[in-house]
Image (cartoon, grey):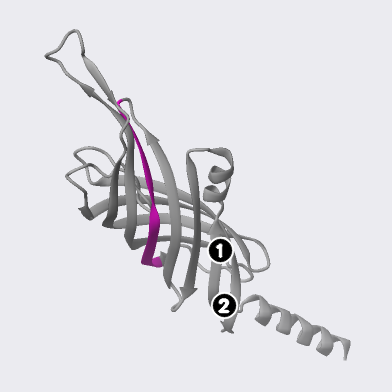
Amino acid sequence: MFTTLYGFSSENKQKNDTLNKYGLRAGLDIQKIIRSASNKDYKGLSINADIRIKKQLYISAEIGNEEKNTNHEYIRSTSKGNYIKFGTKFRLNKIIAGTQNLTYSGINVGFSSFNQTINNYTIYNINNSTWGESYINTPIYSPDLSAFWFELVFGLKTEIFNNLFLGFELQLKSTLSQKMHNEITNFYIPGFNRTYDGSSIGAGFRYTISYLIPVVKK
C-alpha cells in the first residue's frame, strides 16, 4: 500500500514537473526605471509582453515613451515621444523539466512618433578669425517626427521564483525610414536610441522583470 501511494505521489510529481506552461508574460524594463531615477537628462518607461504560441516560438510586443536630452559639442537637443515594437522570438535552449528558463533570438519591427527641440547650437565660421563662433540660443521645434526600423535581438530570461523572471536582451538596429524637419538630423529616436551621422545602424539593450500568467499547461 505504501509502495503504491509512494509510487502514485512520485508519478504525479514527475508529471507536474514536466508540465509546459503557455501564457502571457508581462513586465517592465527596469533599466529605464533606474536610468530615469539616476540621470537628469533621461526619462523613460516601457511595458513588454510575450506569449508562447508553439514549443519554440513566441510573439512579443513592447510599448513605451522616452524623453532624452542629447548634448553634443556644438548642439543641445531634446527628443520626446512614444514607440511600439512587435516581433517574434525563437527558443534556442532545450526545455528542461521543472524549469521555464529561456534563451532566444528574434526579430522586431519598431515605430516611433516624437518631437525634437534644438535648444541651442553653435555656428562656426572658418572665414572669420575674429568672430569665429556664433552661439544661437533660439530653440528650433520640430513636431510630428517619426521613424520606422527593424532590430535583431538576442536575450535570456531566468526564472528566479515561480513564474517570476529576470531578463537581459541585446539589440542590433537599423532604420528603414525617418521623417525629419527641414533636413535637421533626428539626434535621438525614442525606442531606437541614439543615431549616428551617415549610418542607419544603432544598438540597445534592456533589463526586464516579468511575470508569467499561465493560461494553458500541457
- The residue depicted at 40 percent of the width and 66 percent of the height is 89
- The image shows residue 65, relative to residue 54, as above or below, that is above
Whether the magenta-drawn stretch holds residue 64 is answered as no
Residue designated by label 1 = 27
- The image shows residue 179, relative to residue 107, as above or below, that is above
Amino acid at circle 1: Gly
Whether the magenta-drawn stretch holds residue 86 is answered as yes
In this rendering, the count of numbered labels is: 2
Residue designated by label 2 = 20
Dividing the picture into quarters, in which one does residue 149 lie?
bottom left
Across and down, in percent, residue 216 comes to: 57, 84
Identify which residue, 62 or 7, lies in the foreground: 62
Q: Residue lying farthest left? A: 127
- The residue depicted at 30 percent of the width and 26 percent of the height is 74
Across and down, in percent, residue 138 comes to: 30, 34
Tell whether 154 sits left or right of 36: left
Task: State the SS at label 1.
Answer: strand
Across and down, in percent, residue 15 comes to: 66, 82
Q: Residues within 10 Å of mark 1 (few under 14, many from 20)?
A: many
Mark closer to the observer (1, 2): 1
Quadrant containing the C terminus in the rendered view: bottom right
